[in-house]
Image (cartoon, grey):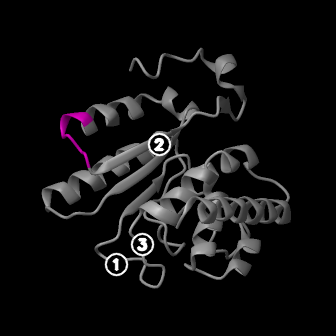
Amino acid sequence: MNVTEITQLARDIRVATLKSLNHLGFGHYGGSMSVVETLAVLYGAVMKIDPADPDWPERDYFVLSKGHAGPALYSTLAIKGYFPREELNTLNQNGTRLPSHPDRLKTRGVDATTGSLGQGISIAGGMALSHKLARRPNRVFCIVGDGELNEGQCWEAFQFIAHHRLNNLTVFIDWNKQQLDGELEEIINPFDLEGK
């Protein structure tokens, strides 16, 4: 995909996400919107995927550590053809395959069940190490929220990733400066992320 196509994909993801959240009547709008462009680039131009075969062994893997942004991931997956777009209207309803947070046992195309902040980066690190040890070319991509970085588990995971030199793992930090309860600076003063 070229830049124009990725830009259009991001718009489509944004619109589909807003429609599904509006249909539900509540949800994490901001957290979902802040990952849209990253999802569009990954699923539109970077990752090796096959929506017809979500478990394709040679695919790249994606972990949404900030699981509350699941609606944006679901919209991305629907647009890419993992399941019908109409299912987006079942978000977080009884019997849905699209729960509030990603669940790999329920949703086609979801590689990791997430929701408890801090755990996704550890899952991604484990996936990347597994591929490296098996000498498989699969890559792993992970989006972590900035508020989530208050969790000590994230920093343990980053140490693990650095120690094992997991160059098949790319981590994106969604630096939107917001948490559920307010601005990041109000909850805990932000740290020097570049310095860490």
Q: 134 or 137, which lies in front?
A: 137
Residue beneath the point at 44% across and 49% down: 142
Residue ID for mark 1: 56
Percent position of residue 76, x then y = 60, 66
| Mark 2 or mark 3: whose residue is earlier in sequence | 3
Q: In the rendered image, which residue does mark 2 sit on?
A: 172
Magenta-colored span: 162-167
Q: Residue 26's x, y, as percent?
A: 81, 54
Quadrant in the rendering for residue 84: bottom right
What residue would you read off at disc 3?
49
Q: CA distance from mark 2 to mark 3?
A: 19 Å
Q: Which is more toward the observer, 135 or 123?
A: 135
Whole-angstrom CA distance, mark 2 to mark 1, is 24 Å
User: Residue drawn 72% across and 48% down?
Assistant: 28
Hey, what amino acid is under mark 1?
Answer: Trp
Three-letter residue code for mark 3: Ile
Secondary structure character of the magenta stretch overall? loop
Residue at (74% x, 66% y) in the render: 16
At mark 1, the secondary structure is loop
